[in-house]
Image (cartoon, grey):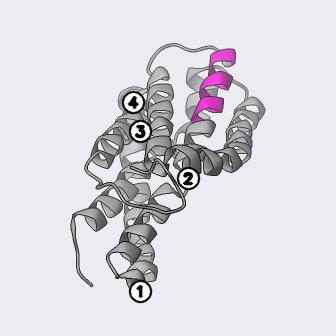
């Protein structure tokens, strides 16, 4: 299988997108640092995922209209800015808004790279590599999650807000890398980039 810049961007951004430094400390941060009860923290997390699922439908329509990479960049900006807000003192109402906007951001980036890579391979007459690439992507996903679980706990002991800052920065870096993706000619969208 030929490795090229686009494939490595795919793998690298998958790794970066899964550096969820907040994963091991999420409930602890909400209950000890923000003073939220555990049942409230769980409901806030559920709200974020429900919003993400609801907006996932709209993100497909927006991707078709404006291009998947443009919509994903908006999603990355939403996630980056809202995760960074945790570095500041926030109250429960702000947490609800932040988590809602993160949910919308997650919906906007959902599945974009997979569809982009499929079209890229199709236009390169390498469609048969798609299954292998998406399988390889899983290794980068799990590497990101594993590494961030360890580092997230260490960052939390230094400052409870550092895991959110680190997670935010991983999305910012991933967004920056996306600017190096070439434009594709996808017949189903007018404004693909």
Question: Would residue 117 be counted in the magenta stretch?
Answer: no
Question: Residues at badges 4 and 2 in contact (C-beta under 8 Å)?
Answer: no
Q: Which mark is residue 167?
A: 3
Mark 3: few, some, or many residues within 10 Å (few <14, many ≥20)? many
Question: Residues at badges 3 and 4 in contact (C-beta under 8 Å)?
Answer: yes
State the SS at label 2: loop
Across and down, in percent, residue 72 comes to: 47, 44
Q: For the residues carrying marks 4 and 1, which lies nearer the camera in this image?
A: 1
Q: Which residues are magenta?
A: 93-102
* x 64%, y 28%: residue: 31
For marks 4 and 1 on the same chain, the one whose residue lies earlier in the sequence? 1
Question: Would residue 101 be counted in the magenta stretch?
Answer: yes
State the SS at label 3: helix
Whole-Å distance between the Cαs marked 1 and 2? 23 Å
State the SS at label 1: helix
Across and down, in percent, residue 101 comes to: 60, 30
Q: Which mark is residue 128?
A: 1
For marks 3 and 2 on the same chain, the one whose residue lies earlier in the sequence? 2
Whole-Å distance between the Cαs marked 3 and 2? 17 Å
For marks 4 and 2 on the same chain, the one whose residue lies earlier in the sequence? 2
Is 31 drawn above or below residue 48 in the view shown? above
Across and down, in percent, residue 8 comes to: 26, 64
Per the picture, the main secondary structure of the magenta-coloured stretch is helix
For marks 3 and 1 on the same chain, the one whose residue lies earlier in the sequence? 1
Across and down, in percent, residue 182 comes to: 29, 55
Q: Which mark is residue 165?
A: 4
Mark 1: few, some, or many residues within 10 Å (few <14, many ≥20)? few
Residue ID for mark 2? 110
Q: Quadrant of residue 137?
A: bottom left
* x 41%, y 81%: residue: 127
Q: Quadrant of residue 105?
A: top right
């Amino acid at each position: 299988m030929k490795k090229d810049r686009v494939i490595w961007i795919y793998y690298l951004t998958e790794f970066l997108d899964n550096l969820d430094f907040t994963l091991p400390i999420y409930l602890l941060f909400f209950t000890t640092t923000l003073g939220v009860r555990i049942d409230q923290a769980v409901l806030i997390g559920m709200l974020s995922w429900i919003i993400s699922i609801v907006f996932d439908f709209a993100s497909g329509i927006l991707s078709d209209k404006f291009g998947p990479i443009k919509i994903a960049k908006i999603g990355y900006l939403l996630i980056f800015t809202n995760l960074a807000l945790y570095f500041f003192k926030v109250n429960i109402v702000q947490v609800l808004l932040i988590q809602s906007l993160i949910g919308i951001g997650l919906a906007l980036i959902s599945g974009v790279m997979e569809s982009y890579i499929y079209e890229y391979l199709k236009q390169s007459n390498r469609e048969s590599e798609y299954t292998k690439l998406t399988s390889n992507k899983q290794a980068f996903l799990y590497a990101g999650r594993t590494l961030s679980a360890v580092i997230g706990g260490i960052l939390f002991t230094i400052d409870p807000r550092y895991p959110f800052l680190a997670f935010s920065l991983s999305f910012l870096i991933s967004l920056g890398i996306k600017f190096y993706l070439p434009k594709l000619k996808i017949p189903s969208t007018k404004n693909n980039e």
